[in-house]
């Protein structure tokens, strides 16, 4: 396969991964009384780390998916804005689910994860171009 074809295929797979992560996040929001541990501290830590990592992965994959369509900086901006919209939709969904609560702290953690994922993407791209 030609290197350009490989890069385009990678971008397509990354975009598909970003969509899959987004759908997974929104579906997880609909699970009533979602608990990872009976220990409140462990449960809270797992949830917060999960938010950060999931949105970081979403942003990194989204940026890779837009790699051949937009410059790196613009791709990062677009993906972070989309991640904010997904984070808000995620928390709003939870207001209608038994045993779940919306949390502005989770939105902040989601956005921090997305910014980190976009930052890591930009470092990767800028390092590759140097």
Image: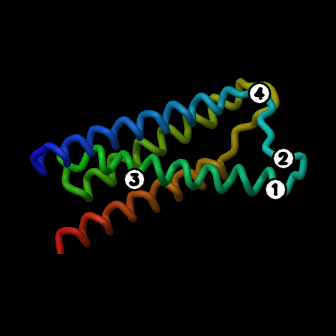
Mark 4 — residue? 32
Cα distance in 3D space between marks 3 and 2: 29 Å
Q: CA distance from mark 4 to mark 2?
A: 15 Å
Q: Do tag 4 and tag 2 residues touch (Cβ < 8 Å)?
A: no
- Tell me: residue 103, above or below residue 121: above
Along the polypeptide, which appears first: circle 4 or circle 2? Answer: 4
Residue at horizontal 58 percent and vertical 55 percent from the top: 52
Q: CA distance from mark 4 to mark 1?
A: 19 Å
Q: Looking at the image, do the residues carrying marks 3 and 2 touch, with CB atoms under 8 Å apart?
A: no
> In the picture provided, is 59 more to the left or to the right than 29?
left
Residue at mark 3: 60
- Pick the residue in front: 25 or 110: 25
Image coordinates of residue 53 in percent, x first then y, are: 56, 54
Distance of label 4 from label 3 (alpha carbons): 29 Å
Tag 2's secondary structure? loop
Of helix, strand and loop, which one carries label 1? helix
Q: Which mark is residue 37?
A: 2
Q: At 31% from the left edge and 63% from the top edge, which residue is drawn? A: 122
Residue beneath label 1, please? Answer: 42
Left or right: where 60 falls relative to 42:
left
- Estimate the x, y position of residue 70 in percent, counting from the top left: 20, 48
Q: Are marks 4 and 1 in contact (CB under 8 Å)?
A: no
Which one is in front, 32 or 105? Answer: 32
């Amino acid at each position: 396969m030609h290197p350009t074809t490989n890069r385009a295929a990678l971008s397509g797979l990354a975009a598909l991964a970003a969509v899959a992560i987004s759908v997974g996040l929104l579906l997880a929001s609909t699970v009533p009384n979602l608990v990872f541990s009976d220990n409140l501290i462990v449960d809270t830590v797992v949830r917060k780390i999960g938010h950060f990592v999931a949105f970081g992965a979403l942003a990194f994959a989204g940026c890779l998916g837009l790699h051949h369509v937009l410059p790196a900086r613009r791709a990062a901006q677009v993906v972070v804005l989309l991640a904010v919209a997904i984070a808000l939709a995620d928390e709003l969904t939870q207001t209608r689910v038994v045993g779940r609560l919306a949390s502005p702290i989770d939105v902040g953690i989601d956005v921090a994860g997305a910014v980190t994922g976009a930052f890591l993407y930009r470092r990767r791209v800028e390092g590759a171009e140097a």
